[in-house]
Amino acid sequence: MIGGNALPIAFGLLFFFFLLRVVLRKSWLAAAVVVLLAAAQGFLSVPGQAGLVLAAFSAITWGFGVAILMRFGVLPLLLAIFVSSLLPNNPLTTDFSAWYASATFTVLAIVLAITLWSFRTALGGRKVLTGNLLEN
């Protein structure tokens, strides 16, 4: 299942970050340890120069994940992981006559639905454009 690993990754990061935060008693220190451990795992998993690139990529990716978790919570982190695993694992094309074009439409429809639902929820019942916007 594509994107099916988003739930365990998000809650695993939440649990690991919470555990480090309890032990270290500082949020920023726990976030730094999570990022450093992710970078170390990336560096040790691939030998040579590619390990440095993977370590940097892992540090940036998990750093964004921890920042989303700290600032917005676990649901936006879950959706970010889901979308970031959904897009590269499905065929995307601009040739609508290709046999796999329906998969492109499905993936884009899912991402668009998540985006519109998130936008509507973030507004909290307020209107997007007010009448006095054009008067100024």
Image: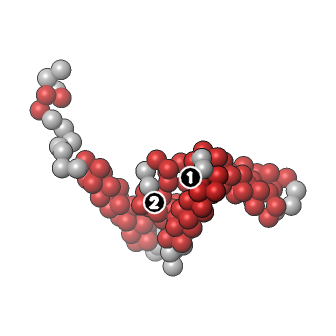
The percent coordinates of residue 113 (x first, y second) are 32, 61
Q: Answer with left or right where residue 4 lies relative to residue 111.
A: right
Identity of the residue drawn at 64% across and 46% down: 29
Corner quadrant of residue 128:
top left
Numbered label attached to residue 74: 2
Q: Amino acid at mark 2?
A: Val
In the depicted structure, whether residue 58 falls above or below residue 4: above
The percent coordinates of residue 73 (x first, y second) are 44, 55
Ranked by sequence position, the earlier of labels 1 and 2 is 1
Q: Dot 1: within a 10 Å radius of its alpha carbon, few (fewer than 14), some, or many (20 or more) residues?
A: many
The quarter of the image holding the C terminus is top left
Identity of the residue drawn at 18% across and 50% down: 125
Q: Dot 2: within a 10 Å radius of its alpha carbon, few (fewer than 14), some, or many (20 or more) residues?
A: some
Q: Answer with left or right where residue 40 lies relative to residue 125.
A: right
Question: Taking the image as drawn, is residue 68 in sight?
Answer: yes
- The count of marks equals 2
Rendered image coloring scheme? secondary structure
The percent coordinates of residue 28 (x first, y second) are 60, 44
Contact between marks 1 and 2 (CB within 8 A): the answer is no
Corner quadrant of residue 129:
top left
Q: 121 or 1, which is in the foreground?
A: 121
Label 2: which secondary element: helix
Q: Residue furthest bottom?
A: 1
Q: Residue furthest left?
A: 131
Question: Taking the image as drawn, is residue 17 in sight?
Answer: no
The percent coordinates of residue 55 (x first, y second) are 74, 53
Q: Amino acid at mark 1?
A: Val
Identity of the residue drawn at 52% across and 67% down: 11
Q: Which residue is mark 1?
A: 66
